[in-house]
Image (spheres, coloured by chain):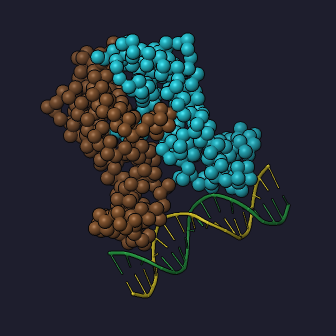
Chain colours: A brown, B cyan, C yellow, D green
Amino acid sequence: MKTAKTKKSEESAEQKIIEAARKLFTEKGFDSVKTRDIANEAGINLALLNYYFRSKEKLFEIIMAENMQKFFMSIVGIINNEETSIKEKVQQLVDRYIDMLLHNPELPIFVLSHMKTTPGRAEFQGRFKESYFMKQIQKAIKKGKLPSMSPVNFMVNVVGLTIFPFIGRPMLKNIHSMDDKQFVALMEERRKLIPEWIEAMMKVK
Amino acid sequence: MKTAKTKKSEESAEQKIIEAARKLFTEKGFDSVKTRDIANEAGINLALLNYYFRSKEKLFEIIMAENMQKFFMSIVGIINNEETSIKEKVQQLVDRYIDMLLHNPELPIFVLSHMKTTPGRAEFQGRFKESYFMKQIQKAIKKGKLPSMSPVNFMVNVVGLTIFPFIGRPMLKNIHSMDDKQFVALMEERRKLIPEWIEAMMKVK
DNA sequence: GTCTATAATTCGATAGAC
DNA sequence: GTCTATCGAATTATAGAC
């Protein structure tokens, strides 16, 4: 174990704990992960966890803030850009999310699971609702360039078509016996197709 | 407490435990729920839980099997019907899932969370992949009636557009400040729109 | 079958040596 | 800073009276 992980011994204990916690909490959530699991994964002593982070809860809050940031903040720049069209925003959103989720596939379930219990922070409240993207969509609907429906549907479709496969990945693995390589190929196919689908969908009616 | 729940005292203790366990496990998962929570929710003594079900784990397995059944088996009849067209199947799938999930909104996150860790049962393996629905889609692609792409994409889109809003509900609540009534209205709108969208999407290219 | 009391284990956290 | 040892609370499970 020591032979292969030369890199890890160069990191500080604090850093090793954070990384172990990030991995385990993001995969399994708060209650399923035991502080001993984190210590083992990090290759450090159990007492160090409390020495550096005071409690399991404090450590979790750090990881949760990190994950929320990664999940939401990566797109606020895109949806509030006043220079780009709806079509351009859709392509950028799809690209950004697919890139990010290919490296952090557990993020959607983590974020959505914990938003069920944790009241969303003021930080993100209305971040979508009041975005320039939403205003563009509402305007397009008024002008008859998009079908008359709840503008939320538009956002749900873009986000859903993009991130749902990551959420449903265990289903694809089991029910469709899809391996990791096939999954990546599927997402690369969807990267091109989703913007085309969105365009076609929005001409309905 | 006793005054209002007259109905509950008519049920057997075993039944009350099952119902409490169903509610709590489905909402919060295995580790977050304590056996005491279940006993309290059921209004029975803690010891009865082990008397009837031997362990927390055995009880959980019952609930998980129930939920898996509800989630998957409700649609096998639809996707294996050799009399209906692709279009009809899409409408039926959307209807069935929306009806079911309006009554069991926690099901998708529960099922997908636990399929991450639990290897899928043989019961469901290949149940989609070998379905008549999949064969119909493959045939339609060959005939050029559907765009040439992975047939999995088709299934992912139908299922994703339908169940993703339930998974993303906490996000809609927080970020879009959407209440329950608005959510139901949204899903009723989508019930009509998703089949139309799917039809439009599949004409791309 | 249902309850009280308690055993057995797990888990988060800390004291204290080095 | 890091470790060993251990405490105290929480939690699952069981023994035994009724």
Q: Front-most of A154 and A45?
A: A45
Viewer can see residue A53 = no
Residue A148, x across and y down, in percent? 32, 18
In the image, A143: left or right of B84? Answer: left
Residue placed most toward the observer, A11 or B45 = A11
Residue A47 vs residue B67: left or right? left
Can see residue A33? Answer: yes
Residue furthest to the front: A3
Q: Is residue B141 above or below residue A60?
A: above
Left or right of A149 in this view: B131: right
- Residue drawn at (29%, 63%), measured in percent from left and top? A7
Name of the residue lying farthest toward the left: A83
Give the residue displayed 28% in from the left and 67% down from the top. A10
Work out whether A157 lies above or below C7. above
Q: Position of residue B53 (x, y in %)?
A: 70, 49
Above or below, B174 relative to A150: below
Q: Quadrant of residue A11?
A: bottom left
Report the label total.
0
Q: Position of residue B17 (x, y in %)?
A: 68, 46
Apparent side of residue A192 relative to residue B149 in the rendered image (left or right): left
- Residue beneath the point at 42% across and 32% down: B164
x%, y% of residue A158? 32, 30
Residue B203 falls in which quadrant of the image?
top left
Residue at position x 61%, y 39% from top?
Answer: B65
In this view, the residue in front, B130 or A48, is B130
Tell me the quadrant of the picture where the C terminus of chain B can be found: top left
